[in-house]
Amino acid sequence: MKPLSLGIAAVFFSSLALSQAEKSNAPDLRAASAKIDQLIEKGLQTVGVKPNAEIDDATFLRRTYLDIAGRIPTIEEAESFHGSNYEHKRERLIEDLLQSEASVSHAYNFWADVLRINSGLGTGATQAEAAYQLWVKKALRENMPYDKFVYEMVRARGYVWENGAVGYYQRDRGMPLDNMSNTVRVFLGTRLECAQCHNHPFDKWTQMDYFKMAAFSYGMDANRYDSPNKTALAKWQKDDRADFFTKKVGVENFPQIRDESQLARYTESDKYESYLSRYKMTDQEFRSAAERSIAAYKSYDHETRGIKNAINELYNPIRYIAVGEKEKTLKLPHDYQYSDAEPLSPVTAGTMFGADIDLEKIDDSTIDAYAAWLTSKENPTFTKVIANRLWKRVYGMGLFEPVDELTDQTVVANPELLAYLVELMRDLNFDMKAYLQVLYNTKTYQRAADGREVELGTPYDFAGPMLRRMSAEQIWDSIVALALPEADSYRPRLKAQVASVEKVRRIYEALEERPEDEYLAMVKQLGSLLEKNTDQQNKVREKLYAAREAENDEAYREARNELSELRKEMLKEVSEVGYQRMGEKVDGGELLAAMGMSEMTMMMDDSGEPKKKGKLSRAVLTSLPKPEMPEPPADLDRQQLKTWKAAQAQEYKTYQSLVSQLARASELESPARRGHFLREFGQSDREVIENASGHASVPQALNLLNGQMVEALTNKFAVFGSRIHSAGTPEEKTKMIFQAMLTREPTPREIELVNAEIANHGDEAFEGIVWALLNTQQFLFVQ
């Protein structure tokens, strides 16, 4: 196997720990929590509102797991918490959860919505998406300071295997103005997009402000990369075309006239008479040569089609692998209407507020200076926006709303509190986990949820956190945690993601590390091979179209199969000739091992409990363990045993089908496809910033009513279903179901109702009980 890229290893692991000096200067977190409570209570007194009552341990446990881990706690986690005699067990739980892999998964969903990380980054850039996802998760796992997190994205350059943060620009590839608008909106809380076409109608920003800001990042190019071999290839193609035209046209330095319209434009231009005079040609001689030029152009395209196909096929897998900063001048639009500049005038980059950036004194790149200005502690809105955004994540509403629209008219619910939070975030050096730890440890967070309706623009007093319905990801992940063992460690796409990034690195090196003469010879050789293949494909396509026109289904299928085989043959030729230096096939498991990670190997016993094998340090579960088959009852005769085994096999087959698509939302296609549970329950399409919905709908009710979630949970081979089947008495089964789903014991009245169901339906009643609890507000809401 070729050596592993150190850049890919860095996707997972790099030390970002605070220095001892930074730690020693960090504020007292308990004192910070108390200060926040003091400011909240001061605000409540001002409006004459009493704080909500403190919640009990069971409510706190469930709320904290949902808010930090993104799922409900398991029975074992609940028992561990309730059984602890530690005086500050709530503090310890918050700290432990913030360091967990579950919190990484949940935080990733949050940031993926903010950053619009979706499949292929919206443009088919699958390797860039994989690298970007891995980079964001690594940053969250290692608690990269927020200012560095943003700085690294905004200044990101390089290849996807070196720097996954380049996905930030790949997401808006070819749309630099939109990228700037999104940057300013997300990180500075300013809606500048309305100033792209004219001065902002509702804010102070001018169209010139917009273009000055856009000029900073206008040169960030995510469309292609340059290399010596690509430059040599372009030069060879240019020289080859010139030689071909000269031979065919028979005139030195003759302009390459491609068609009749270009000929008409040239002969009507001022340079036409000058050319005739300089080369002593008549009009008729020029037009005759032009006809040969047009014919030569068509002929050259045909004769070099193999070369073009070779280049397209060679570089198709690595189209979106790099971001670079290039010198590129941004100009005002042609219809610019203001007196401070003429239309199409070049724009000099300039900041919209705060400190100016002196472009003449920049030692490094413009984008680096821009990123440093953006993320500076002195930037007037950068810290304020993230302090408020994370506040909303904890309490359900920001101190100002919307969180990404901060104007001179913005009403802040508690200005003194916001000022303190900004100061706290700066003192913590943008340590997001420490900041969240402070918020979760406040008495305010640990008060009863507030179900009052608060209209947009009306300040909220924060008598307690807002009552919220779970997000689509929280509902899904809670169900996954019930059904699967080690749900937080299960990452079914990880090996494929890492392998895809490593594969494009090897393809790049196979092409760009060749000596120039060998590289050009390879392109020509492959071009010759593909020319033959292309001709064959064209002939088969004619057969395909004819069969479709004649509605001959059998001939159509034969032609499609033949075309598919030719396509496979072509890709094989590309691989063997173009990528022959790639080495062995990329193995995701070997890559994980090279990065210091191990695959978790597990089995499940007949009670649904996972049995782990091997070292679990930095371990991930990349495939689900096969449950141990239960032993058949001893008193079965031969026919009964056969029937029993058949029933077990069918239930296991159903289990495999049900759980094949189960994993935490952060590990699935992002976002899920239309019609998927996640999308039905409001998962963002990630086309625009934070586009998720928490509203109830008829499709959601139908999904819970007719979907397969209950069947996935109660199947005897699922973790939850296995526990139901293996529990003893009906009362024990009932208690286990309530503990697992609602994190509490059933009330006497609930036991009475369940017993009535069991009396009528036997063990089948438990599936109905699971369905009923899944549909309750107690399950679906963060209370």
Image: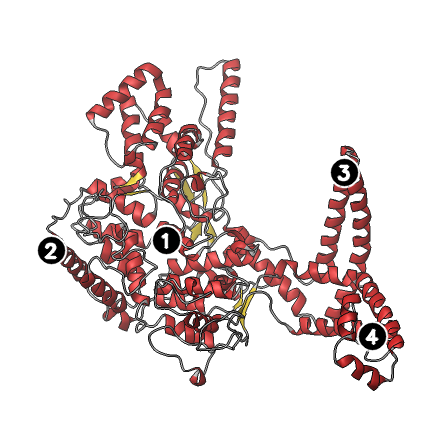
Tell which tag, 1 or 2, sits nearer the viewer. Answer: 2
Please determine whether, in this image, residue 598 is positioned above or below residue 650.
Answer: below
First of labels 4, 1 by sequence position: 1
- The kind of residue tagged 1 is Ala
Left or right, residue 264 beside residue 596: right
Q: Of helix, strand and loop, which one carries label 1?
A: helix
Can you give x and y, in whole percent of width and height, for residue 122 in the image?
53, 54
Q: Which residue matches tag 1?
A: 107
Q: Distance between the residues labelled 1 and 3?
A: 51 Å
Q: Which residue matches tag 3?
A: 548
The image quadrant of residue 319 is bottom right
First of labels 1, 2 by sequence position: 2
Residue in the foreground of this view, choosing between 194 and 104: 194
- The kind of residue tagged 2 is Thr
Does residue 615 appear anywhere in the picture? yes
Looking at the rendered image, the quarter that the C terminus falls into is top left
Please determine whether, in this image, residue 105 is positioned above or below residue 24.
Answer: above
Can you give x and y, in whole percent of width and height, for residue 216 in the image?
46, 73
Residue occupying the point 50% across, 66% down: 176
Q: How far apart are marks 2 and 4 (CA)?
A: 85 Å
Is the residue under label 3 in contact with that under label 2 (CB below 8 Å)?
no
The image quadrant of residue 276 is bottom right
Q: Distance between the residues labelled 4 and 3?
A: 43 Å
Q: Which residue matches tag 4?
A: 243
